[in-house]
Amino acid sequence: MRIGHLGLALLVVVLWTLSFLAVKLGLRDMPPLALSTARLLLTSLPWVLVLPRPPVPLHKVALYGILMFALQLGLLAVAIHLGVPAGLAAVLLQMHVFVTATLAAVFLNERPSQWQILGALVSFSGLGLVAMHAGSASSSLGSGFSVVGLLLMLLAASAWGTANIVSKRLGPVNLLSLIAWGSLFAWPPLLLASLTFEGPELILHSFRNLSGIGVGAVLYMAYFGTFLGYALWSKLLHLYPATQVAPFTLLVPVLTILSSAVVLNEPLLPWKLAAAGLVLTGVLLATFGARMVRHLQRAPS
């Protein structure tokens, strides 16, 4: 990979890392569903007026948008609102790799490899470690977030994994168009959920008292974390094989854990680092295990 393109890949990692911090900062001013609604509203409008509609049936674009954006981002925001640390949320979202593999085996007849099975076992051991430490903030063994928050993060990862299968069935489409049009179908159900569960009074109060940090968080998530990040990512995938680009995404949870400790004062607890290491090791084994073995077998003794 050329130096300039390597810099773009690292820039995407930084943009996506800061998106997790932006969610946490935005939640200081807005309830989670309203925050996600505002993010996706800005992601879709006015861009759907200038970007061509993906050349696939609209109901498939709507399904992708609801899964990838409404459910994944909405559940992520609610989980962080309930106390899941931003760094840990970034790690738990990596479970989408195994959801994608499972659904691909069921619906696309793609048989999981032994490395994917081994990676899943390692990652789920890290998930079990997280579950052991989930509890109330007042608990001496708890981590300050509830089991509900953990379950919501797993649902968010499941929504991402399911969206990957839907995306695969769409075939080759312009990624930016898919983001904009998918977001157009994602924010109305989020707005309805926000009005139902958070209430119009709380929503109006949060908008009236929105701070500069809150405004910046929403704008950052919509334009930098989503549009710019995915635009650069799409460019890299066009220039290089996915196998050469994909490993950079594993830097996102690592940097999120470190940056959230600095910016948000999230403690770097030993169990959290161990759980993150297990989850990411499992993802590495599932994604690159077979390739690493073939490389070692070809290497001169």
Image (tube, rainbow, N blue to C red):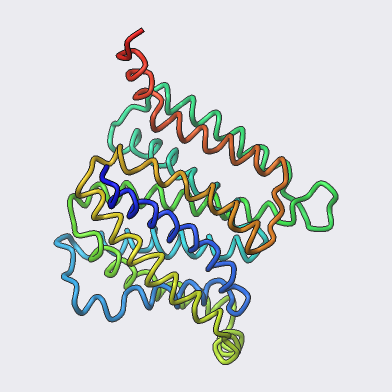
- Closer to the camera in the image, 70 or 14: 14
Residue under the point 26% across and 47% down: 168
- Would you say residue 230 is visible in this rendering? yes
View extreme (top): residue:
301
**Residue at image location 59% in from the left, 76% down from the top:** 31
Q: Position of residue 25 (x, y in %)?
A: 59, 71
* Image quadrant in which the C terminus is located: top left
Looking at the image, residue 213 sits to the left or right of residue 222; the answer is: right
Q: Residue at x 49, y 43 (%)?
A: 95
With 238 as the anchor, is 19 left or right in this view? Answer: right
Q: Position of residue 282 (x, y in %)?
A: 51, 32
The image shows a total of numbered marks equal to 0
Instruction: Tell me which corner region of the image, top left, top right, bottom left or bottom right, holds residue 188.
Output: bottom left
In this view, 255 is above or below 296: below
User: Is the residue 301 above or below the residue 160 in the image?
Assistant: above
Q: Position of residue 89 (x, y in %)?
A: 57, 53
- Position of residue 24 measured from the top left corner of the image (x, y, whole percent): 59, 67
Q: Residue at x 46, y 72 (%)?
A: 190
Identity of the residue furthest to the bottom in this view: 208
In the rendered view, does 84 fall on the left or right side of 112?
right
- Residue 59 seen in this snapshot: no
- Quadrant location of the N terminus? top left
